[in-house]
Image (tube, rainbow, N blue to C red):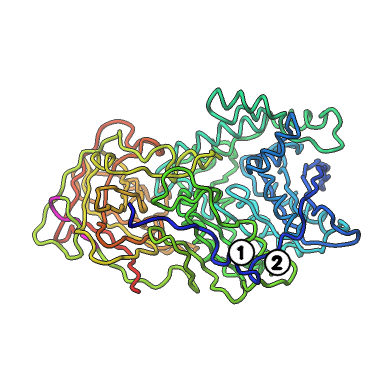
Amino acid sequence: MSDNTPASDAAWWKGDPTATPARLYDDSVRTSHYVTVTDGTRIAVDLFLPKGLAEGAVVPTIITITPYFRSMEFRHPAVAALFQQLGLQGTIWGHEMARLGYASVIMDMRGAGASFGRKRSILMPDVTRDGSDVLDWIVAQPWSNGRVGTTGISALGMTGQWLATLKHPALKAIAPRFTVFDMYRALHPNGLLPSRFLADIGRALRAMDSNRLWDVPESPVQKGLFYALVQGIRPADDDKGRKLLAQAVAEHVDNEAFDLDIAGVTYRDDELPIAGGGTTLDTQAPATHATDMEAASVPVYAYAGWYDAAFVREMISLHNTVRSPGSRLIIGPWDHGGKNDCSPPVDGKRKSAFDQAGELARYFDLHLRDVDHGVADEDPVHYFTMGESKWKSAPSWPPPADPVRWFLTPGGHLTDSRPEGTGAEPYRVDFDAGTGVWSRFGKHLSGGMEPACYPDRAGQDRKLAVFDTAPFSDDVEFTGHGIARLFLSCSETDGAVILYVEDVAPDGTVLNVTEGHLQLSYRKLADEAPAYWHAGPFHTGLRSDETPVTPGEVMTLEFDLLPISWMFRAGHALRVAIAGADKDNFVRVPERGTPVFDIGWGGEHASHVELPIVRR
């Protein structure tokens, strides 16, 4: 695809000395400590300070709270240096923020890593209680300027949102990255269960909690390599002989498995089977506590990647719901964690050129030490348009666009006008269809080293029902939230619809643009808007809203597509591909039987997708 050569995802401010935060220090100094919280439990923390920080100097602090483990101990110092350079142990953020002039505290939450106690499936109460005590400890240190921010990826980004609900006077800014807002919607997208992610994260959790870090990788070769290089979880510096670490890990034997609770519910209002006590996924979802977050008046930097499961939708909802002054939103061409530039047509592995630590420092500098690198004058929203490989900005999300409907028509065509006549296109679900184990919902979510990617979809699309436009005569930009409206009957009592929007190049190469999901029995739309910002149709996921499927009866299916910004180049075509399964990433629906769909077209059953087109 020579007409679509990728450009770097380097930040829009790269090369501008006035916009670039300086690396004030060449190195960092790490120490590991126990902080005793109110109930006497010892909580393990790593502290990174700038190397060479003058005596009496004070700096702001960034805290990260993890339910996994804060850092590893290696069998040789050279291995530690290599892992830090590669960013494989999580401490790269502590090191980089220290170089930028921050103290960085990485905290093992209760029951995790080297911390004592038992980890519960419902994490929020322990994070907020112990986090408050650790914030008090931070501001009491001689190196603290009394201002603290928090950031973290995935579950670590969720703990930062919970921390904001405390309204602790020291917490001045948060930056949740690649994480969730509505836990049920993110982890059960319109009823489907992402089996790949939950299986991988569950295996990793059990290995971490038992301090068998070499069991985190899947392959025997990787396991053996980890065992040879990694001693285990890093003990506190004064834990001679690792006795305290051993005692802490022994207390983790009774940890609850929050991944099993996530997988163990079917509906939003189902009680978590392990946590019990009437708790649901909503109990600790940041969206449930949005009012408290906004009342804290703490700016929020919502950080997302186009190829990060459904989390990009979550971060947009966070940004548009918690409207604290100074809040920002960024969406890059990234997978989970932002290590890789996944913007097509990148083929293979390409490390992101975006200075993630520098961008965080630009944000935190403004709120934690009153230094402005031009951030206050920038648009609060930045997003990367794929296919064009260009950063853009806007005062709000989504940017202005015209909704255009593309109608499914007989013979596999897609047109912007309603077809004449009526009918239905049959499709027999192929349960061998999938998007690969490295798709946006794939293995990379559990910390895999490979980027999210979608190889040429032309072969897989032969297993799907596909509908194509004619090639575009001009470039067409699709930015925002698409909506699917299908009129469909199913031969079984339940099923799943996965709708892909794809880019078909003149040479026949097919690239994934975005997708949407719906389990048929979840199709009932909410009577009222949700309590937070959401684009398009909203399905409650409540047990009382389950709507059984009557075989052969035409259903109206409305669901949103994951947001995207994509440039279709002139000569390329837009494809809508409809599947009933993704064998690599989602649980099969139904468990037995092979559904046949009849997809309506024309008249009252004119199935279509509505895409926001940006006119320039």
| Viewer-side label of 2, 1 | 2
User: In this rendering, is residue 275 above or below 576?
Assistant: above
As for residue 409 lying within the magenta part, the answer is: yes
Amino acid type, mark 2 = Asp
Separation of marks 2 and 1 at Cα, in angstroms: 14 Å
Q: Relative to the observer, which residue lies in front, 302 or 133?
A: 302
Residue 205 is one of the magenta-drawn residues: no
The residue shown at (59%, 59%) is: 289
Residue shown at 62% from the left, 44% from the top: 122
Q: Which residue lies most toward the bottom here? A: 377
What percent of the width, then of the height, locates residue 160? 65, 54
Image quadrant assignment for residue 596 = top left
Please give the residue where the numbered disc 2 appears in the rendered image: 365
Rendering coords of residue 38 (x, y %): 82, 48
Residue 300: assigned label: 1
Q: Main secondary structure of the magenta part?
A: strand
**Left or right: 500 with respect to 267?**
left
Q: Nearer the viewer, residue 342 or 523?
A: 342
Q: Earlier in the sequence, mark 2 or mark 1?
A: 1
Q: Residue furthest left?
A: 421
State the residue at coordinates (55%, 48%).
Answer: 339
Q: Position of residue 70 (x, y in %)?
A: 70, 42
Give 594 or 505, whichever is nearer the viewer: 505
First to last magenta residue range = 406-411
Residue 110 located left or right of residue 517: right
Could you tell me which secondary element the residue under label 2 belongs to?
helix
For mark 1, give the secondary structure. loop
- Amino acid type of disc 1? Val
Q: Residues within 10 Å of mark 1 (few under 14, many from 20)?
A: many
Q: Residue at x 17, y 54 (%)?
A: 413
Q: Residues within 10 Å of mark 2 (few under 14, many from 20)?
A: many
Q: Which residue occupies the foreground of this view, 545 or 531?
A: 531
